[in-house]
Each structure stands twice: as C-alpha cells, then as structure tokens.
Amino acid sequence: MSTPDEPIGFGESDIAHGETLLEVDGLTKYFSSDSGLFAGINLETDQFPPVSFGVDQVEAVDDVSFEIKMGETLGLVGESGCGKSTLGRTLLRLLDPTDGTISFKGDDLAEMSGEELRQKRSEIQMIFQDPQSSLDPRMKVGQIIEEPMRAHDMFDDEGREARAKELLEKVGLDPRHYNRHPHAFSGGQRQRINLARALSVDPDFVVCDEPVSALDVSIQAQVMNTMEELQEEFGLTYLFIAHDLSVIRHISDRVAVMYLGHIVELAEKEELFENPQHPYTRALLESIPVPDPRETGVRGVLEGEVPSPQNPPSGCRFRTRCPRLIKPEEYDLTDEQWKHTRAFMRAVKRRTFEPMTAPEIRREFFGGDTPRGEAGEIVEEAIDLIEGDGEYQGDEDDEREGWKRATDLLLESFAERSICAQEQPAYELESELGTGTHFAACHLHR
Ligand code: SF4
C-alpha cells in the first residue's frame, strides 16, 4: 500500500502534456421511452386520434466525435436539454453508450466492464453541479474526501487522513475543518470539498458538470481560479460543462458547442468567440446579457423551442430555428427574395401576425412584390390560405386549418427541400485566430 510521503499528485501520467488523452468517436446515447405506466404510448398532438403506439428513441447524444489533449480544458456549452450532461456521464460510463468508442489513454472505455472499469475510474473523476446534494450530510468532510481513496484501496487510515488534510489546504480550505459536516460550509466551500474528493485518487481527467452554476457570480470566479491552479499543479485535464458562455470563456482552452445531441461547432476559445461560424453559436453569443443599463433583457434571443430529441429534424438539427436556412436549389430566387420568403415562412409557421388582406401580406413581407416563377406561385397559394378576407376566415376551425395548410405547404416546398434538411453538415475550416482546427456543422461552409 502506498504512503502519503509521496507528493500529492502521486502518480506520473504516461501521457505527455499536449498529447491526446481522450478520443471520442461516433459516441451515441439513445434512451428508449418504454418505461413507466404509459410505456409505448406516444402523444401526437397533430393527428387524430392524438396517440400512437410503439417504442420511441430519445436521441440524447448522436454520433459525437472529438478529442481532448492532456492538460487542456475543453468547454462544452449549449442550452439545457441539449445532451451535455448525458455526454459527460456516458464518457465516464455512468451511462452505457449505445454506439461509438471512448478511447482513454488508448483503451476503449465503451468496451470495459466490471473490475477493469472500476480500476480505470480512479483516473477519471466527476464533479457535479449541486454541491449541496452531492455531499452526504451525515458524513464528515474528512470521510467524504477519503471515500474514493478507500474504494480504490489507496493508503492506510493515517495516510488517507494526511492526504485529505493536504487536499483541503490545496483547495483553499482549512485542514482543521476535517471533522466538520458539510452543512457548516457555504456553497462555494462545498464545491471545494467536492474538488478535494475528486482529486484524492489522483485522476488525470475530471468531468466538471456545471460545477459553478449554483454559485454566486463572485464566488464562481474564485472557484474557477482554484480549479485552474490545481490543473497547473497536478497536470489535470478538464471537460467543463456549462450553459453560461461567460463561465466557458473564463476557463476553456477550446470550446465545443452542442445542440440537440450534436456538436455543431468546435474551435479554440478565441476563435470561437471572435469568429463564430455556426448560426447557433452566433445566436448564443448574441443572447449574452449586456452589462449596459440602457439595454434591458437579452438581445437576439433564439426563436422557437428546441425540438424533441425523440423526433429530431433531419439533416441539420438546428434548421427549424436557423435564421440562415439555405435556399433550395430548384427555385430561381435572388438572395433578397429568399430572405423575404424565409421570413414569411417562419412567421406563418409561428403565426406571429394577425390576419391581413393579401396586399397587406405582400407589402409586409415582400415589399409589395412576391417572387416570380414556381416559388412565387407557392407563396401566393399560401397567402390565399391565410388572407383576412379569404375562404378560410370567419370560422375559428377553418382559420386554423388555413394556417396549418399554408404552413405545411411552405415547409414542404421550401424548408424540406433545402440542403439543410437533406444532409447532415460537417466541415473543417481554417482558423483565423490561433493555430487549431475549426469544426462547423453548417452547410453555409460547403
Ligand atoms: S446547415 Fe443550414 S440550417 Fe443548419 S445552421 Fe447551417 S444554414 Fe442553418
């Protein structure tokens, strides 16, 4: 059994700084929605009867590939429900992957089980969001920090206590608090205890799942600074999951942006923040609150809801909300005409305007003049279906039917025929800033 006489980062890693530590290829995690009382019954609001039967898959993480180098911090950002936490948990094998490989120091974690996986877990640790609920209130701080060492049979009692006290100091707490219970600590201090626990088994890789989200902004920076110091001292590698871009900007070397189970953009931090190439990343950046008292709320808030991962859009998953959806090849439209048509389609789909007469609609969306040719005929047919004094107006049900038919017509004729709906995008671009590669899953770069 080892003794704590060795330095606190007691094992030298066999991977050098800057070499690939973790390589994920085609990682996929689907959940089936076949548990519970209503197993196999699906609600379909747009059909009658509004139920269907069969087991649906929730595509939480779908065909994700990336690598993390020894000593770096990869930030993983996206709205809640985009699959970030599922990805983190699947990497650690807290969830079983549906498909793909997770190569850690050359060994595929996805293939491991039993004792082999348990052993490997000392090299990979996780810190969770809520420091309150992830610490057992009945245990003393010392016991909490020693627990993973005990599980991996590291040191004797005396050795574990010495290491726990040393780690308390390293994470910025007083070693004399070894016998206190977690409730005696603030949120930030509790997250430091979590950090000490994770580091107790000398991991190389730590998945940090929203570790500072529950903390006050002023405390967030302090905890992140400590994490950076520890990273330097122990040569740690972090996957840092957060929904807050300012947190991601503070701590990351590279950033991956996730949307509905896919990675849509990945680049070095500066490149991603200064030269974003995916419309979703741009929308996220634009929605950062501005610290200007004259501006209220957030700017450029994303339109619409994230679609269900049970039935994600074909091609690019962001296409149902993308303000830059690409024009279908078959129509002869100028960029300006497509911009108008796209805006009209989105407004009809979301029913964002009150019924108007046909000339009013033409004026409002097309500057008075709808496009010529086949595209123009489709637009005119849609206008016909929703115009204020047309055949579908007057009765509420008829009106609803008119808007639905116009929406279906526009989506089928334009949105579904775009390359964005037909092919899944994946492009490697040259970085303008820094030296790394820049991945963007957007056909604007085809
Ligand atoms: S592929 Fe199309 S829908 Fe997707 S982000 Fe790019 S432009 Fe938008």
Image (tube, rainbow, N blue to C red):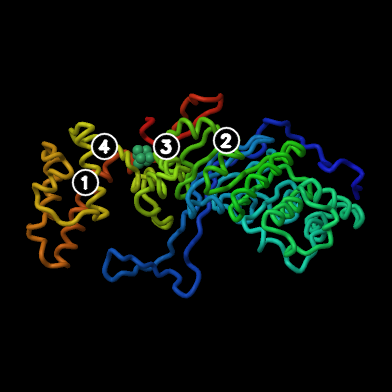
Q: Is residue 40 left or right of residue 326?
A: right
Question: Where's residue 271, x and y in %?
Answer: 51, 30
Earlier residue among tags 4 and 3:
3
Earlier residue among tags 3 and 1:
3
Q: Secondary structure at mark 3?
A: loop
Farthest residue to the front: give it: 293
**Quarter residue 235 falls in:** top right
Q: CA distance from mark 1 to mark 4?
A: 14 Å
Tell me which residue sits at (78%, 64%) in the image: 181
Q: CA distance from mark 3 to mark 1?
A: 23 Å
Residue 172 visible (yes or no): yes
Q: Secondary structure at mark 1?
A: helix
Question: Where's residue 286, x and y in %?
Answer: 42, 41
At label 2, counting other C-alpha atoms closer than 10 Å, the crowd grade (few under 14, some 14-19, many 20 or more) is many
Mark 3 residue type: His
Residue pointed to by mark 3: 278
Q: Nearer the viewer, mark 1 or mark 4?
A: 1
Residue pointed to by mark 2: 254
Q: Nearer the viewer, mark 4 or mark 3?
A: 3
Q: CA distance from mark 1 to mark 2?
A: 38 Å
Q: Is residue 40 left or right of residue 339?
A: right
The label number, if any, that marks residue 344 in the structure image: 1
Q: Is residue 14 left or right of residue 78?
A: right
Earlier residue among tags 3 and 2:
2
Q: CA distance from mark 2 to mark 4?
A: 32 Å
Q: Secondary structure at mark 2?
A: strand
Q: CA distance from mark 3 to mark 2?
A: 16 Å
Residue in front for this viewpoint, 227 or 377: 227
CB at disc 3 and ligand 1 closer than 8 Å: yes
Mark 2 residue type: Arg
At label 3, counting other C-alpha atoms closer than 10 Å, the crowd grade (few under 14, some 14-19, many 20 or more) is many
Residue pointed to by mark 4: 327
